[in-house]
Amino acid sequence: MIQNLRTEVKKLLKDKKVDIVLGWEKGSLPLSSSPLFIHKEEDVDRLIFDETCRNNLTTYLTKDKRKLGKTYDKIGIVVKGCDARSIVLYVVEQQIKRENVIIIGVPCNGVLEKKKILQKTENKEILESKIDGNNIHLKGRDFDLKFPLKDVLCDSCLTCRYPDAPVHNIFIGKPRKEVDIKDEFKNVIDFEKKSSEERWEYTKDEYARCIRCYACRNVCPACYCNECFVDQNDPQWIGKTPEVTDSIIFHLIRNLHVAGRCVDCGACVSACPVDLDLRIMNKKVEKEVKERFDYTAGLDIDEKPAMVSYCENEKQDFIMG
Amino acid sequence: MKNTYIPFQMKVKKIYTESPDRTLKTFDLSYINEEDKFDFLPGQFCEFSILGKGESPFGIASSPTEEDILKFTVNRTGSVTNEIHYLQEGDIVGIRGPLGNWYPVEKFKGQDVVIIGGGFAFTTLRSLLVYMLEHRKDYGKITVIYGARNSDLFIYKDEIEEWEKRDDLTLHLTIDNPVKGWNKLTGFVPTVVKEVSLDPTSWCVVCGPPIMIKYTLPVLTEIGFPDEKIYTSLERRMKCGIGKCGRCNIGSKYVCIDGPVFSYEEIKKIPEAL
Amino acid sequence: MIKIKKSEFNKFIENLQKNYSVFAPVTDGKATAFKKIKSSDDINNKVLNTKRSPKEIFFPQSEVLFQYTEKGMEVPKREEKPFAIWGMRNCDTKSLLLLDKVFGEAHQMPKKDMYKDPYWKEKYDNCLVFNLACNEPLSTCFCNWFDGGPFDKTGSDIFVVETDDSFIFEAVSDKGKKFLTDCKTTENESDKEIKKIEKLKETAESFLAEKEDISSLFSKTKEIWDEPIWDEIAAKCVNCGACTFVCPTCHCFDVSDEGKGNKGKRIRLWDSCMFAIFTKEASGHNPRSQSTQRVRQRVMHKYNYFMDNYDEHLCTGCGRCVVVCPTNLDIREVIKKILNYKNEE
Ligand SMILES: Cc1cc2nc3c(=O)[nH]c(=O)nc-3n(C[C@H](O)[C@H](O)[C@H](O)COP(=O)(O)OP(=O)(O)OC[C@H]3O[C@@H](n4cnc5c(N)ncnc54)[C@H](O)[C@@H]3O)c2cc1C
Ligand code: SF4
Ligand code: SF4
Ligand code: SF4
Ligand code: SF4
Ligand code: SF4
Ligand code: FES
């Protein structure tokens, strides 16, 4: 698979079909990868795709990185299913032109969640790791663990319905087709069953840890505003302190802004340095949007952005109630 | 130890509206407590507080010789400056200062000085000019070039009239484009600097919008001013004013404590200064 | 040298709490941080680098500078007891020395008092720092690049080594000496203990990756300031503030007023040079509007500008930023890239 991918990418660069290709390379930490910007053919050999390719690279197409879109007429980008859905979102929201990106789909079997791995090793450092088939083997100074890979995949991946890029120019390897997922909203349903005190306690404790570094926002493909509401000072919309009330307001507004646009790529979840459970609210909103509008973000490139006026006009009783 | 973050209170004594579009106002503040009075030199600045809104840095426009007041001219542009513009005479405001360094008036003694200013950035230049005029005997020839987009945008118009009458001071006023009724110079400051004949053995102080500074400094070099005799005042976003909050640096220099006054010689050593 | 059996650790902490507010590494929800502890049971001596750095004990993420009413301004009263911090690692104790340069004086000396940060000074000058040796450094630790080390004592009052059955204390500063003398525990300088410590130290140092020679980093960063290498370094950064917020040496903050009418407070909050609005001026002009300029600011500040002003690197090699960066922008690799960069000429 990886050889085919590299060959295709080399070809694209050689034929000048693209000016740059976004992919992943091996990271500097165990079980990590890092975004790779390929300009030259000789860099293609650094390209990888495996369970460590966590980042949603489409975020580089917008935001501060909008200059990427300006500097290059043709951008190639390697995408998992969720990543490709972010591109659909960009096209629908007219952030990029479809013809300016060459979408290279790769078959995704899910990516690793560092936090789950650290739970397994009880926060001990991994010094050696190996993935073979459906199992993962980890070694540290005083442990040697082997367990099924799916124990440490991202929650988003475990409930992912569309592992293949729904829109692509090239697809490398064998597509996995739509996966039949029954309990996509299990975390939300379980959460809803709790009493409102329990829900509040949980929410409060989670958001109390937020350090307002905005990594979640900055890696999120759906957050690409030039000036985010939290950064405005005249008027200043919300407090900038890490107090739990300020943080909750930040996250709730962000949730509303990405409502019907979040593709559940999990980028925010793994970016968060203090391991907040950001997914529960993302999924809650996604579930509401699905139930009320029968809409799933990022699947249909011809769809009008139906969600645009949604958060302003609709009843917002689902937030806390 | 005095808490350096706590402003002391001053009373708004007098407000002047400087421009007909009301975007520029000058505020004379008087001390409430004698012990708050501080020594400073032209070029220094203060943090001006409106409690509940925040703090903003402004160059001190009064001269140290005007002992009972502090004068600031404020351009209305954002949250704090908006609030400052709502002030009424008699209101109480907070001040922290004096902050930063100053124009090297000690070095100017006995020598000719050229002052070049643009727009509302004439504030600390007013301080310098008034200071030198108060100690007139200490200095040689004083030449002032002051430019504004149009004649409405000069600040301290009444004082300019007074200065024009003096024979111990050469004053060149210029506006960007000719208009009927304007019989002084026209053209951008850098061009005017080239046109009026300046003596490159003088000291020179330049203050104005960044773009003006950027284009004026090379002209001065062309005329023959050595880098170490050209001074200018730089601006960066600030918060603490005391070298801690980290945002006002240009390279390893912090505008709030290493500046705001820099010589052209120093500026050339820090990339991105202009 | 003083030895305290692990079984006596609880009592030791209890005694310490009589005169000090004791902070120590704790597991707080899913993350680790230095927090004020209720009892020694809260302490997690196993965690090497807490996710959040202990700088927040002295320089909290949000701190009230003063409250104001129509009557005037008032600094909130702080709790009476001085701080004791248990379990800091060398990279963190060193960071306190660096921060004290910024908050204690700033590099401009003439008007001293004005440049003293009273909030920092009050807490820092009265604290007692216990530096716990790192028996098992992580693969992300690179304190040795900056002449620190798992058993280095710089910046602490009392140096502590955890052995199999005890904690061994050694006074480093005068404050530390006084504390240990007052402890009234008998001194015991046994060869056995010294050997144990030597052994632990050796093992710990063997865990560290090879030391990189960074002596030319200062001149090199200056040289390449204008080179295109920065675009390459910065390309993947998404300009979140994670690296700077977890960093024990980053000191930047914003000041913001909260209040209505005559009542309110002025607070300071951590800020980061990675954020675009950090330097954005009212006119809209922004001297560091590009992501590349901001990444360069962070790297230059740590390895060049701070050196220029204080003759030290503003980095202790704790590796926190390496761990948290969502794009794996590894500062160690940035340093290596810079050191190995060949200018075109
Ligand atoms: C040394 C120095 C001297 C100055 N002298 C004058 C003067 O005499 N007259 C005048 O009108 N203006 C002066 N300025 C610019 C003035 O400080 C800003 O226009 C003002 O801070 C804008 O504040 P705001 O709250 O209205 O704008 P906002 O955009 O709402 O800014 C919010 C805050 O950011 C900071 N900030 C934003 N822009 C700047 C900036 N350009 N410089 C510094 N801090 C900034 C301030 O803390 C400000 O309160 C000076 C700036 C400096 C650095
Ligand atoms: S909110 Fe999180 S999961 Fe949703 S699109 Fe953004 S980064 Fe991905
Ligand atoms: S990444 Fe985590 S800590 Fe940072 S702002 Fe988002 S939720 Fe808060
Ligand atoms: S820059 Fe990184 S390694 Fe250096 S002190 Fe800060 S967090 Fe630690
Ligand atoms: S690296 Fe950035 S955030 Fe950290 S101290 Fe330097 S300027 Fe401030
Ligand atoms: S944590 Fe990484 S991505 Fe975020 S600002 Fe720092 S270097 Fe950039
Ligand atoms: S204004 Fe805070 S460091 Fe200069």
Image: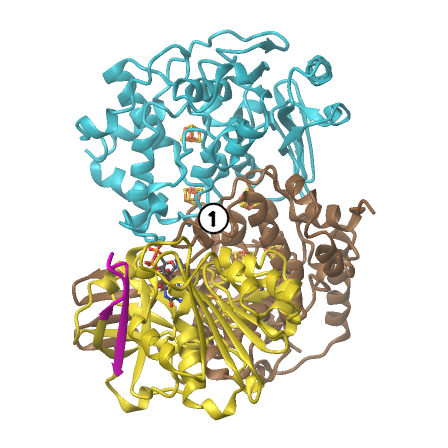
Say which residue appears at 47% left-offset and 54% top-offset: C279
Between B146 and A35, the residue placed more toward the observer is: B146
Residue C5 visible in rendering? no
Quadrant position of residue C132: bottom right
Decide if residue B208 is in sight here. yes
Element at label 1: loop
Tag 1 subunit: C
Q: Which residue sits furthest bottom?
A: B137
Q: Which residue is mark 1?
A: C275
Pick the residue in front: B60 or B111.
B111
Question: Image check: C87 left or right of A128?
Answer: left
In this structure image, what is the colour of chain C? brown
Q: Colour of chain B?
A: yellow
Q: Nearer the viewer, residue A94 or B150?
A: B150
Q: Quadrant of residue B69?
A: bottom left
Which quadrant does ligand 2 occupy?
top left
Query: In the rendered image of this protein, does residue C254 appear above or below residue B11?
Result: above
